[in-house]
Image: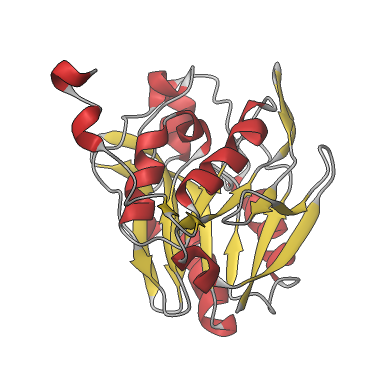
Amino acid sequence: MFKAAIIQFEPALGDVDKNIRIISQKLTETKDSKLVVLPELASTGYDFTDSEMAGSLAEVPAESAYVKMLHDVAFENDQYIISGFNEQCGDDLYNSSLLIGPEGLMGTYRKMHLFMNEKKYFKPGEGGLNVYDIGFCKLGMQICFDYLFPEPWRILAQKGADLIIHPSNLLTQNAMKALPGIALMNKVYIVTANRIGTEGELAFNGNSMILSPSGDILTKASSDSIEILKQDIDPTLAHDKMITSMNHVFDDRRPEQYTGDNC
């Protein structure tokens, strides 16, 4: 059993220093949590005006003051922090999620399914459906719009993920409707860290939540307030893939029937 936390807040578009100050302060309230999750693009905001702005705010993780701050906190508190991040790699930008622990940067997931204007700035991620064993649980990562594509979630679950971490900048309730089904179909916990506030014409709807492997909402934030959610999680509950005494979510699959002439 361990405690997971979500920090739901309103990132300031383009003001990395302000966001670092806000996040640093909020992290003082999550020292009791072994795992802390922040929203998508938490340090930069989301709705970039153009490619130049997106590029000016992108960082190489190893050179980022934001990543250093997260590492310092993770080291001091002996915890793991996951945050959305505007990642620069060579000439390319990625909408990424970083896993940072006491040892430093442990893993990166680059968003595969880009939404709307993200396609103007970011390159879609390839591969990277990794499961990370952090001692007290195994986790994978997805980002925001990835919720609409079930295949990666199933792959992460089949690879042994107990939790799938989901930094987000969600605008509608569609994900909140879909995610309980995804959790149930894969018998995994889902930790969705959404943001609040507005940027331009975009209004983000909060409702960050943690879902059980049965698809139940264990804790959920409001739609418009800065909040910290905390929830005790028993990762062994995600090891049980039985739906009934005779039905297993993976063993009952018939993939040979899903392709080719059988479709």
Left or right of 121, for residue 169: right
Left or right of 257, for residue 232: right
Residue reaching furthest to the left:
261
Which part of the image, by quadrant, shows the N terminus? bottom right
Q: Residue at x 53, y 75 (%)?
A: 74
Q: Position of residue 199 (x, y in %)?
A: 69, 26
Q: Does the image show residue 87?
A: no
Which part of the image, by quadrant, shows the C terminus? top left
Who is closer to the viewer here, 176 or 112?
Answer: 176
Q: Does the image show residue 257?
A: yes
Q: Position of residue 184 (x, y in %)?
A: 55, 47
Scheme of image coloration: secondary structure
Vertical comparison of 56 with 234: above or below: above
- Number of marks drawn: 0
Q: Residue at x 40, y 47 (%)?
A: 59
Vertical comparison of 255 with 18: above or below: above
Q: Residue at x 64, y 52 (%)?
A: 211
Q: Position of residue 239 (x, y in %)?
A: 45, 67
* Quadrant of res 142: top left
Who is closer to the viewer here, 59 or 138?
Answer: 138
Q: Position of residue 64 (x, y in %)?
A: 43, 57
* Quadrant of res 219: bottom right
Q: Residue at x 68, y 77 (%)?
A: 31
Who is closer to the viewer here, 72 or 30?
Answer: 30
Residue reaching furthest to the front:
246
Vertical comparison of 134 with 105: above or below: below
